[in-house]
Amino acid sequence: MKNKSIVFTGCDQVEVRELEENLEKLQAHEVLVKTSFSLVSAGTELTCLAGVESWFSFPSTPGYTSVGEVLKVGDQVAGVAPGDVVYTWGGHRQFNRVNLAKPDSICLPVPAGIALPLVPFARMITIALTALRVSNIELGDYVAVIGLGLVGNFAAQLARLQGGRVIGLDHNLGRVALLADCGVKNALVMEKPSALGKVAEITNQRGVGTLIEASGRTGALMDGLPLVGRYGEVILVGIVRGDYETNLTDVLDYIHLDSCGNVTFKGAHEWRYPVARDPFVKHSIERNSEIALDLIRSGDLQVAPLLSHTLSPYQAAEAYHGLKTRKNEFIGVVFDWTSV
């Protein structure tokens, strides 16, 4: 059976390949899904395309969030059946095999009433939701989010739903405007010292109680530290990439000294929680995913404004070039596999 896939063949080299694969016979816990739409995770996939992720080798197929129709299931699969529309962590390929026996697999029925191109955004929402799970955000608290890509935008929206008074910051004017369109009115361009002054004004000179760093840039984190008030918290949700040189003593002084604030740092990578539900753990990625899908369905989370491009897989090279060079325009890029 032929399976079309987007393939990174080398640094900055993108192709669509048709590969012969044995998709007829499934193992007992496998599900075969015909992909309808898959979403690009720009931060991860661009670094893979640049050849700087040690775990990603060429040639390989990128991507890890998609929606599609179940074609067949193995003998031991329960919960989904042929004909169901499901959300999975499938890559950018026409057909995805999901092995539910593996601890890092998701295959969830999609609730009725969701536009299918929006479903893959659930993965970005669950990544952002991890920051909220580890936070101390309560009703009325000031929250700043640095980096307003998909994860940062969702983190800001989720913090607002949790009762926070949210301030979003990014160097990109288009992303700042987009966050305002999604309901977070305090959206600022991250330019020192004006941004620091505006945040101080908004928070009555007290600073924010929570800073969520979603850009993945160490420099952005360092610029954001002065936003944090005394006894505040800094939550790292973006994966830091690239070298950055600074005086670590200054950073430690800011975190520790009474004159600065006794700040707490927290890691919020999505894998801090188990994937499957566990009776002894409140949070899981599966539960977070179900909540994300419900937030999309209800409209409580604004997702449609972030879908900037729906492209054919054959336009993959154009998509990645746009995500790399035109960040003002390319925000959420979805590949449409329905016509392939």
Image (cartoon, rainbow, N blue to C red):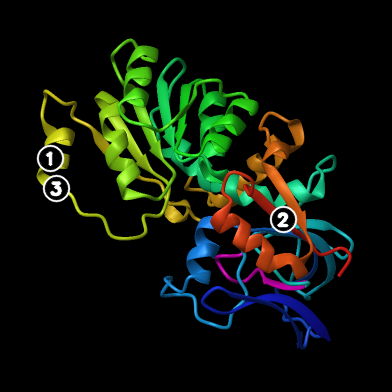
Q: Which element carries disc 1, helix, strand or loop? A: helix
Looking at the picture, which amino acid does disc 1 mark? Asp
* CB under 8 Å between discs 1 and 3: yes
Q: Please identify the quarter of the rendering in which residue 52 is found.
A: bottom left
For residue 229, side relative to residue 251 (left or right): right
Is residue 202 highlighted in magenta?
Answer: no
188 or 111, which lies in front?
A: 188
| Percent x, y of residue 2 | 82, 85
Quarter of the image with the N terminus is: bottom right
78 left or right of 340 in image: left
Callout 2 amino acid: Val
Residues 274 and 127: in front is 127
Q: CA distance from mark 3 to mark 2?
A: 40 Å
Q: Label 3 crowding class (10 Å Cα cut-off): few <14, some 14-19, many 20+?
A: few
Viewer-closest of 179 and 68: 179
In the image: residue 222, left or right of residue 11: left
Which residue lies at the image location 47% right of the left edge and 47% below the top edge?
A: 281
Q: Which residue is mark 2?
A: 334
Instruction: Determine which quarter of the picture holds residue 228.
Output: top left
- Depicted 292 relative to depicted 41: above or below: above
Question: Is residue 97 shown above or below 266?
Answer: below
Which residue corresponds to the image point at 25% horizontal and 35% vertical from the top-left? 264
Amino acid type at image mark 3: Leu
